[in-house]
Every structure is written in structure tokens, then in C-alpha cells.
Amino acid sequence: MRNLLMLSLALLASGTQVSALSCMRPDVVRTYTQAAEAEEHYVVVHGTLRFDEQRLPEAVMNESPPSTKIPARITGMALSGSRFDTPFDHEITLEVLCFGPWCAGASSGVSYLGFLEVKGGAYTLTVDPCGGNGFAEPTEEALRQVELCHAGGPCRQQTE
């Protein structure tokens, strides 16, 4: 995901015209694997995300902010061991990224599977136009697959 962000920023900085955004299909297993292999520390949470939707950035050609940080709260359960069984109720930062004229969307009051980066005791959920680290209204199968990956079982990315 960071590579896509860097590529997008490089294209914008170089003045190259970008006419369409091409994204890989969001996949909870790929995101889990990236978080597990990252140098940064992540906690995986399934819960309800709440924030002021009026603070979401507007997608405007050449005028969208690259990053908007919004105070938020997620209440639910964190992944520990092999299940979502640890209560989690924390203030977080929802970081909404824009790639040129495309901005991520998010909805308040909705169930999310979130891969939250932990830095200095603070939690950040980053979403981007290609999905990012948040999955709105995850299916039971997606939650089971993340639990299976975390427990050391087979981690299989979704196929089309």
C-alpha cells in the first residue's frame, strides 16, 4: 500500500497526468500479512467506528489534501490468540488519504475490521482510495480468515 502511495505521489509531483486509479482488490489476508510483516506494530480490531463524517475530505482535481486526520473512536474486540476476544474501546486517529482527485471514504457507526498502527500508545486507522487498512462491514468469512491467519493456520488471499 505504501508503494502505491509513493507511486501516486511521484506521479503527481512530476506533473504526469493521471486519468484513472487502478487498485488491487482489497483483501483482508493480504492486509493481515502486510501488517504482520511490517516493521511498525499493528493491532487488529473488529468494532464500530465513530467519527464526524463532515470532516472527510472532498475529492477535487488537484486540490484534495493528501492526508486528513480525523479524531475517531472504535469500540469492539481486538484479536488476541486465535480470536477477537479482547475488549477494545479507544480513541483513534482515522487517517484518510487522497491520491490526486481520489479520496478514501468511510462511514461512521459502521462495523469495521481495522488494522490499527500503534505508535507511542496512539492508534491510527489509515484508509485510502484503494481500501487501506479498514474493511467496512466485514463478512464472517473475512473475520474467520484473519483469525485463522493469526492462529498460524493457512492464510489464503481471496481470488476472483
Image (tube, helix red, strand yellow):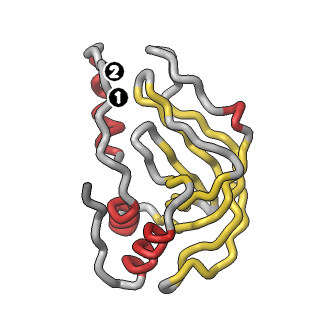
Q: Which secondary structure, mark 2?
A: helix
The reply to whether dot 2 and dot 1 touch (C-beta < 8 Å) is yes
What residue is pinned by disc 1?
9
Nearer to the camera, 16 or 41: 16
Q: Dividing the picture into quarters, in which one does residue 78 lie?
A: bottom right
Residue at image location 51% in from the left, 48% down from the top: 126
What residue is pinned by disc 2?
12
Nearer to the camera, 139 or 32: 139
State left or right for residue 87 relative to residue 60: right
Residue at image location 69% in from the left, 37% down from the top: 53
Q: Dividing the picture into quarters, in which one does residue 100 lie?
A: top left
Q: Position of residue 71 (x, y in %)?
A: 70, 45
Residue type at the position of mark 2: Leu
State left or right for residue 29 relative to residue 56: left
| Picture mark count | 2
Residue type at the position of mark 1: Leu
Q: Which secondary structure, mark 1?
A: helix
Residue at image location 50% in from the left, 64% down from the top: 139
Nearer to the camera, 145 or 71: 145
Distance between the alpha carbons at the discs numbered 2 and 1: 5 Å
Residue 76, compared with residue 69, is above or below; it is: below
Residue at image location 39% in from the left, 41% down from the top: 130
Q: Position of residue 80 (x, y in %)?
A: 54, 81
State left or right for residue 135 relative to residue 16: right
User: Quarter holding the C terminus?
Assistant: bottom left
Q: Position of residue 58 (x, y in %)?
A: 58, 23
Residue 130, compared with residue 20, is above or below; it is: below
Q: Position of residue 1 (x, y in %)?
A: 35, 47
